[in-house]
Amino acid sequence: MAITKEAKTELISQYRRAEQDSGSPEVQVALLTARITYLTEHMRAHKKDFSSRRGLLKLVSQRADLLKYLRETDREKYLALIARLGLRK
C-alpha cells in the first residue's frame, strides 16, 4: 500500500472538520490525492503497468466527483481545499 498508517492519520488530522471526522469530502480528497501522487510516481518508473494505470484513472475520476460535489455544496471549502492541496492551477 502506498500510504502508511501514520501518514494517513496525519492527513486525516489535517483535513478533518471535527474531532471524530474521518470521512468528510475534504479528508477523502486529501487521501485520494496522496494515493494519486504515489501512483503517478510509480507510473513514471513503470510505463507499461496498465493495471496500475487503470487504478490511477479510477482514483482521479473518484477525486473529481468528490471535488464536484464539494464545489456544488460549499464553494468556500472547495476553494480552500484546492488551494491547500495545490490542485487546479
Image (cartoon, rainbow, N blue to C red):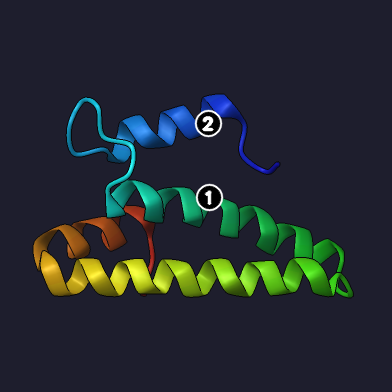
Q: Position of residue 70 (x, y in %)?
A: 22, 66
Q: Amino acid at mark 1?
A: Ala
Q: Position of residue 20 (x, y in %)?
A: 24, 27
Secondary structure beneath label 2: helix
Say left or right for 64 vs 17: right
Q: Which quarter of the rendering shows the C terminus?
A: bottom left
Q: Which quarter of the rendering shows the N terminus?
A: top right
Give whichever of 66, 83 is nearer the camera: 66
Say left or right for 60 vs 13: right
Disc number for residue 62: none
- Write down the residue under mark 1: 34
Residue 58 sits in which quadrant?
bottom right
- Write down the residue under mark 2: 7
Q: Are marks 1 and 2 in contact (CB under 8 Å)?
A: yes
Mark 1 packing: few (<14 Cα in 10 Å), some, or many (20+)? some
Q: Amino acid at mark 2?
A: Ala
